[in-house]
Amino acid sequence: PDLELHLVEPMLRRRGLTASTSREMRAQARSNAHAQLATVSRIGSLIALAGVLAVAAAAMLGVLGRARRITSLRTIGMSSRQVASATFSELACIVLMGALVGLGIGIAGRALAVHYLANSVSLPVSLYISWPQFARPVALVAAIAGVATVLAVRASLRLPLRRALDGR
């Protein structure tokens, strides 16, 4: 086959064409598939970043929106630490549920992307995700939600009792 290619190649070059072996074509298709998968992963990362920012904003607004309730807890005798702990525990449950749903959606989305790429280039594409690739986004979302909650709880605990109870 390589001999035949070498005989045909000069004729193709004169006409502005190139010849490739099937091995070269498979390698090029595999490279294209990996490049497309990397692009899909980058798009997914941007979507995840938007989700992280949404989680942080929701956490902060949720806590600040309940400033009156938090102040009520303080007036009945709960310490600032107890109020912060209760609020943080509540948000941890919400973040955990969101992480589980997001994990399912992420795995399904990646599987669909891999399926699309495998069908478009007719080559197998890997779905392997290492533990660091999995753990980093989960830790990032948890950390950002935690920091947002702590900041919002601190802000609501600093409100004077009278102002918080008046709702101003």
Image: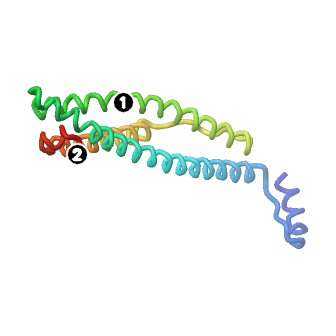
Determine whether, in the image, residue 150 is placed left or right of residue 53: left
Instruction: In the rendered view, tell whether residue 82 sits above or below residue 40.
Output: above
The coloring applied to the image is rainbow
- Point out the tag, 1 or 2, that comes first from the N-terminus: 1
Q: Nearer the viewer, mark 1 or mark 2?
A: 2
**Type of the residue with mark 1:** Ile
The residue positioned 11% from the left and 26% from the top of the image is: 76
| Residue 112 % position (x, y) | 63, 36
Instruction: In the rendered view, tell whether residue 6 sits above or below residue 59.
Output: below
- Residue at the spot of label 1: 94
Quarter the C terminus occupies: top left
Q: Residues within 10 Å of mark 2 (few under 14, many from 20)?
A: few
Residue at disc 1, secondary structure? helix
Instruction: In the rendered view, tell whether residue 144 sits above or below residue 8.
Output: above
- Residue at the spot of label 2: 168
Query: Which of 68/136 is in front?
Result: 68
The residue positioned 36% from the left and 33% from the top of the image is: 95
Residue at disc 2, secondary structure? loop
**Distance of label 1 from label 2 (alpha carbons):** 27 Å
Q: List the single residue furthest toward the bottom.
A: 14
* Badge 1 vs badge 2, beta-carbon distance below 8 Å: no
Query: Which of 89/16 is in front?
Result: 89
| Residue 69 % position (x, y) | 22, 32
